[in-house]
Image (spheres, rainbow, N blue to C red):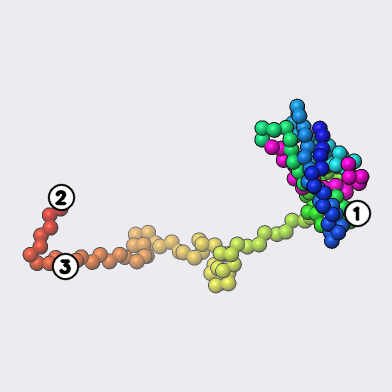
Amino acid sequence: MKVEIIEKTENPLLKRTDVKFKVDHSGGPTPRRLDVRVQLAAQLGVSEELVVIEKLASTRGRQVASGIARTYNSREQLESIEPKYLPKRGMPKEAKAEAKPEEKPKIEKLPEKKEEKLKEAGAPEKPEEKAEKPPEGAKPAGKAKEVKEKPKESGEDVKES
């Protein structure tokens, strides 16, 4: 595996260096982020923990991967700017388990919008309470559909085929 830096840009406002690179991985699969990070840190002369690989993608049909990385001046700067998942992405599984924060308590589920509107309107909570069953033998309470017949116009008989 051979790492080649294509472009290196200093960003003084964010106190970091943006790097575009290519990795030649002839005869093997796309290299792991951890391995690329080690080589980039060695070439740039910084600590491995200050290098974050944003993107590493292989080109179809070729044994070359291209990527984007950023190096920071301090760990505090890295943690304040980068999303939390990105630095963890290139770490080995053991280090990810150590860096995992404690779980937060679950938030109680809020009632759905329909239930809130029903409660505000003073409607009963359960639909069974809303409708009472009619006694046996009684006709169901509901609107009867009215059927209106069109008056036939005189002299016109229409045959249906």
Which is nearer the N-term, disc 2 or disc 1? 1
Q: Tell me where residue 13 appears, x and y as whole percent.
A: 84, 61
Foreground residue, 16 or 5? 5
Mark sitting on residue 161: 2
Q: CA distance from mark 2 to mark 1?
A: 88 Å
123 sits left or right of 51 in the view: left
Counting residues from the start of the chain, the first of labels 3 and 1 encountered is 1
Classify mark 3: helix, strand or loop: loop
Q: Residue at x 9, y 67 (%)?
A: 154
* Residue type indicated by callout 2: Ser
What's under tag 3, amino acid-wise?
Pro
Label 2 Cα crowd, 10 Å radius (few <14 / some 14-19 / many 20+) = few
Q: Which residue is mark 3?
A: 151
Q: x, y (%) of residue 150?
A: 19, 66
Left or right for 116, reference 100: left
- Residue at label 1? 74
Secondary structure under the numbered disc 1 in the rendered image: loop
Asked if residue 153 lies left or right of residue 136, the reply is: left
Q: x%, y% of residue 118?
A: 55, 68
Foreground residue among 47 and 121: 47
Q: Which amino acid, by three-letter code, is at mark 1?
A: Ser
Q: Is residue 151 visible?
A: yes
Magenta region, residue range: 43-59
Toward the left, the furthest residue is 155
